[in-house]
Amino acid sequence: MLKQEMVDGERGLADPNFRADVLNGLAATPRAIPARWFYDRRGSELFEAITDLPEYYPTRTETALLMQVGPQLGALAAPNAAIVEFGSGSSTKTPILLRAIDPAAYVPIDISGEFLRHSAAALSQAFPGLPVHPVEADFLRPVPLPTQVAGLPKLGFFPGSTIGNMNAFHAVNLLRAMREWLGEGARLLIGMDRVKSPDILIPAYDDAQGVTAAFNRNLLERINRELAGTIPVDAFRHRAIWNAGAARIEMHLEAQRDVAFTVEDRPFAIAAGETIHTENSHKYGPNGGRMLLRAGGWTPIREWTDPQDWFALALCEAQPLRMAP
């Protein structure tokens, strides 16, 4: 699925999957829109700003962990591998891995095409001898890898605990799809955020500067721009909630008053206090994380955590499937 941006609010150019998810999500009970639609260019820029916030521990913790274990990764990766990064964004952590692995090729996959092309060009300049093959796609749908990396051993890279944005059913399905795309014998380096105190978790998703709130509300602005929406963005406030039973942070947009609006001429009404659920960020204990990976067809072979055990990196292998121990 290739993403097509709207230009100056023109109608008819929006990604049909975006249109379907928005219209169906606003009509659902409870209302919800998948988090992947945060990432237009403005949303991608806002997320990069979030990663620099003092409250947002995942990026700096994972980055420090990558730097620490880089030599071990270099020894564990197959020679002449192609690194395939899912949801590459600005690829800020990628240079650490590229220097540790010295791969034969790099394939960044991201839904935000303009952001992807910019980061791919920057990496090509930083690593002039490395073939870079960007793929603009939604990795929640089938992703054909470039023919240039066919036959090369694969190392999947899925940092940032993005797997936590999905419920267990969809997370397992994605891991199984990655196994199919990368092939038996491939390896996957994945980041997984640990369960910890809500006093640490909630500020990471509701920062004092309001950057995460702007990131959340940008989804409404995107709907207005790309789908001719008339949503009163200022009528919604950002909320971050720790759902202990589901072990996840939830992000919502809560209506501060009764609102009525249209999206592509379809009318909607949301009562004061009602929310649009926009993101989950599931947190995993060690056993839960390993169980999830195994259910997705990946066998954990090494695991690293920071000294506070806030974040984990797991290196997994797509070993032959077995029906018995």
Image: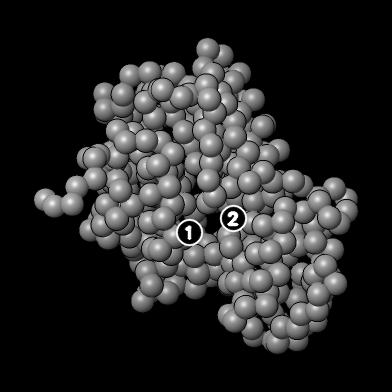
C-alpha separation, residue under disc 2 versus residue under disc 1: 9 Å
x, y percent for residue 189: 36, 39
x, y percent for residue 228: 84, 63
| Residue 210 seen in the current view | no
x, y percent for residue 68: 32, 33
| Circle 2: residue type | Arg
Relative to 129, residue 265 above or below: below
Q: Which colour scheme is used?
A: one colour
x, y percent for residue 260: 80, 81
**Would residue 311 appear left or right of 319 to someone viewing this image?**
right
| Residue 207 seen in the current view | yes
Residue pointed to by mark 2? 36
* Badge number at residue 165: 1
Q: Residues within 10 Å of mark 1 (few under 14, many from 20)?
A: many
SS of the residue at dot 1?
Answer: helix
Relative to 84, residue 201 above or below: below
Looking at the image, which residue is at 86% across and 56% down?
Answer: 11
* Badge number at residue 18: none
**Would residue 173 appear left or right of 140 to someone viewing this image?**
left
Looking at the image, which residue is at 67% across and 31% down?
Answer: 118
Q: Are marks 2 and 1 in contact (CB under 8 Å)?
A: yes
Choose between 83 and 318: the one closer to the eye: 318
Choose between 162 and 138: the one closer to the eye: 138
Looking at the image, which residue is at 75% across and 76% down?
Answer: 235
Q: Residues within 10 Å of mark 2 (few under 14, many from 20)?
A: some
Looking at the image, which residue is at 58% across and 60% down?
Answer: 35
| Circle 1: residue type | Asn
SS of the residue at dot 2?
Answer: helix
Q: Quadrant of residue 271?
A: bottom right
